[in-house]
Image (tube, rainbow, N blue to C red):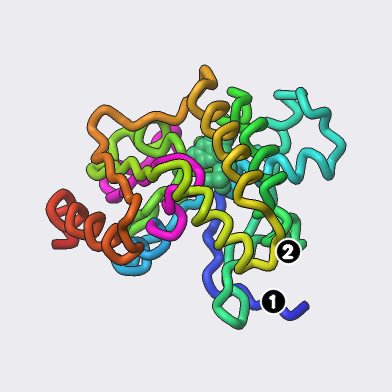
Amino acid sequence: MAFVIHAVTALPTIPQPPSPNPLIPVIAIDGPSGSGKGTIARRVATALGFHLLDSGALYRLVALAGSQQGVAADDQQGHARVARGLEVQFGMDGAGEERVLLAGTDVTRAIRTEAAGAEASRVAAMPPVRTALLSRQHAFAQPPGLVADGRDMGTVVFPGSPLKIYLTASPEERARRRHKQLKDKGLTVTIAGLSQEIRERDLRDSSRPVAPLRPAEDAVILDSTGLTIEQVVDQVLALARSRLPAIS
Ligand code: C5P
C-alpha cells in the first residue's frame, strides 16, 4: 500500500534526559476510555500548532509487539524490553489519515480494536513497562509545545504541566461514543458489550497500584456529557490561553 509520512514524530535514538524540558508548555489531558480525550487532544493540538502524544497508542503497540514476539502474557521484563525496543512511526498517509507503523508495518487498525485496548490495559499495569516508556514520552515535548493524551500525563509523566485537564463523561455516553467511533471505522461491536468492556477497563486502570487513573490534584475536571466536541475544545483553548501566557 502507498504510504507517505508527512509528519513523523521523531522518537529518541540517543538516551534522553530523565525529565521533560520544563520550558516546553505541555497540556496534559487525562481521563477514562471514551471520554473524548483523543479527539479533543488532536483538535487542541491542531488549533495551537502543538505536537501530540497519544500515549495509549504506545501501550497498545507494546501489547501487539509483545504478542508478535511471543512474549508470555505475564512476562513484565519481556514486555519492558519490547517497550524499549519499539520501532514505531506516527504519521499521515496521502489522504491525511493518521497512520501508525510498527517496524515498518501499518498497524493502525490492528491497535484500535477493543481487544487491543484490553491487552494494552494489561501491559500498562506492569511497572517496568511504564518506566520503559517514560523517556520516550518525554521526548515528545518539543517546541512550540505538546498536548499529551493519556491516563497519567498530569500525575506522572508531565507533573509540571501548567494545564492539566481531566476529561470525563457518563459511562453510557462513553459507550455510545465509542460505538459510533468503531462503527465509523467499519468494526462491528454492540453497545452492551462496549459498556461492559469500558467498566472493566476503568476498574483495571483506576485500581492498579502503579500510575492509577485519577485526576491530578491541580487538574481541571471537565465533564463532557451533553457537550459537543467544539464546546469542549473551546473550553480547553480558553483555559490554555489563560494558563499559558505564550499563546494568549
Ligand atoms: O487511551 P487508550 O484507550 O488508547 O489506552 C489503552 C490503554 O492503555 C488504557 O486502557 C490504559 O490501560 C493504558 N494507558 C495507560 N496510561 C496512559 C495511556 C494509556 O495506562 N497514559
Marks 1 and 2: CB-CB under 8 Å? yes
SS at badge 1 = loop
181 or 155, which lies in front? Answer: 181
Give the image location of residue 150, x and y in percent.
46, 43
Give the magenta part as a residue range.
14-40
Q: Is mark 2 within 8 Å of ligand 1?
A: no
Q: Residue at x 26, y 36 (%)?
A: 219
Instruction: Give 18 or 146, whichever is nearer the viewer.
Output: 146
* Label 2 environment density (alpha carbons within 10 Å; few <14, some 14–19, many ≥20): some
Identify the image quadrant of the N terminus.
bottom right
Q: Is residue 4 above or below residue 51?
A: below
Residue 67 in the image: state x and y as whole percent: 81, 40
Residue at point 68%, 54% (across, down): 189
- The residue that mark 2 highlights is 106
Q: Is mark 1 within 8 Å of ligand 1?
A: no
Amino acid type shown at disc 1: Phe
In the figure, 134 relative to 225: above or below?
A: above
Q: Is residue 26 left or right of residue 39?
A: left
Category of crowding for the residue at label 1, using alpha-carbon neighbours closer than 10 angstroms: few (below 14), some (14–19), many (at least 20): few
Find residue 62 and report its horizontal and vertical position in percent: 68, 41
Looking at the image, can residue 135 be seen?
A: no
Rendered position, 39 above or below 243: below
> Residue at the location (18% across, 61% down)?
247
Magenta span includes 3: no
Quarter containing ligand 1? top right
Q: Secondary structure at mark 2?
A: strand
According to the picture, the residue beneath numbered tag 1 turns out to be 3
Amino acid on which the number 2 mark rests in the picture: Asp
Tell me which corner region of the image, top left, top right, bottom left or bottom right, holds residue 208: top right
